[in-house]
Amino acid sequence: MTRSPLIIALLCALLAGCVSSPDSRPRGLIEAEQQLGQGARAFRDDDYRSAAALFRRALDYYRSIDDAHGQALALINLAETALAVDDRTAVRQHLAALAQLQPRLGESQLERRIGLLRARLLLREGHPAEAARLLDRLLADTEPIASKPGLLHLALLARRTEAALAENDLTTAQTLLQQLAPALERDATPSGLRARILRLQAALHARQGDPAGAEILLQQALTLAHRSRNRPAIAATLEELADLALKRKQPARAAELLERALPVRSRLLDQAALRRDLERLDRLYAQLGDETARRRIRAALAQLPASGEGARPELPAQAH
């Protein structure tokens, strides 16, 4: 999973019109906006627990003054944060609250951002066809102006490409990636989105029987993720490199890549992804006949919370 650039864009949209006369506004409103800003910074620093707490405080204030737009901003950010740690129950709760607010929001960018969140949850839960239909409707409402698609349009295109790949619709995926390609050359495109586009290109190459081309693209994505210190992108790219190594019958290489992903996932508090990587490593070390490594991995698995409470397990040190 990569961090969403939209969470910062939402904050900027909120604050842009509020800097001219800060002293004349209610203190609670100023504090709620500050909490959204602090939450956005915590999210950017991968401190999802603090981000969620700050967004909840802002939500409480906006509810106390019956501000539908402010509530929607806080709920969208809460849903983004829940997606970052794969807390699907929380995502569904936030989306349900947003659905109740939507009649009061009218036609707006917020409505399309809410739709994107729904599509991301559908993809996460293995419903690519339903996600594709929703994304097609959203894309029809966000046509780019003068061939320069905005951030929301690019994010929708990337998720639609993900849906096409999940359905093995390589023709559609290739067409969508051609539309996304110019964004790689623009400095204004967030690094996380650029890394995602490269990873989607790599997935297409791998499906088309070009593992060497996929490797090159994934290494480019990893370099970009390292340069921007983007932990979600780093973890996702390492995991996809491990997938590619397995397809190329390189289990030792796959294990090494997944070992590198473990401390990143642990820092992100993404228990579902961490468990998945540990279980894959357990199988890989069984295949490689490394019982010492298996014991280390199983010890880490035993420390994981049963229901993903968010505790960060201590990962036993890898033997060198």
Image (cartoon, helix red, strand yellow):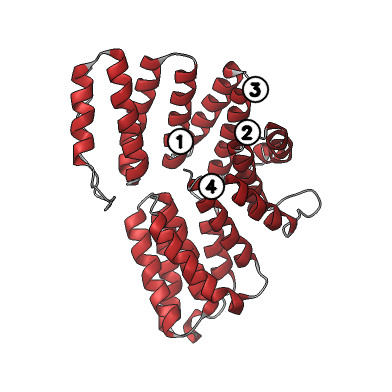
Residue located beneath label 2 in the image: 168
Q: Compared to 223, does 274 lie above or below?
A: below
The picture places residue 286, in percent across and down from the top left corner, at 28, 18
| Label located before the other in sequence (2 or 3) | 2
The picture places residue 236, in percent across and down from the top left corner, at 45, 36
Q: Compared to 183, does 31 lie above or below?
A: below
Please give the name of the residue rendered at 58% of the width and 45% of the height, measured from the top-left corner: 128
Residue located beneath label 1 in the image: 236
| Label located before the other in sequence (4 or 2) | 4
The picture places residue 73, in percent across and down from the top left corner, at 51, 68
Please give the name of the residue rendered at 61% of the width and 66% of the height, measured from the top-left corner: 111
Residue located beneath label 4 in the image: 123
C-alpha distance separating marks 2 and 1: 20 Å
C-alpha distance separating marks 4 and 3: 22 Å
C-alpha distance separating marks 4 and 2: 14 Å
Which structural element holds mark 1?
A: helix
Residue located beneath label 3 in the image: 208
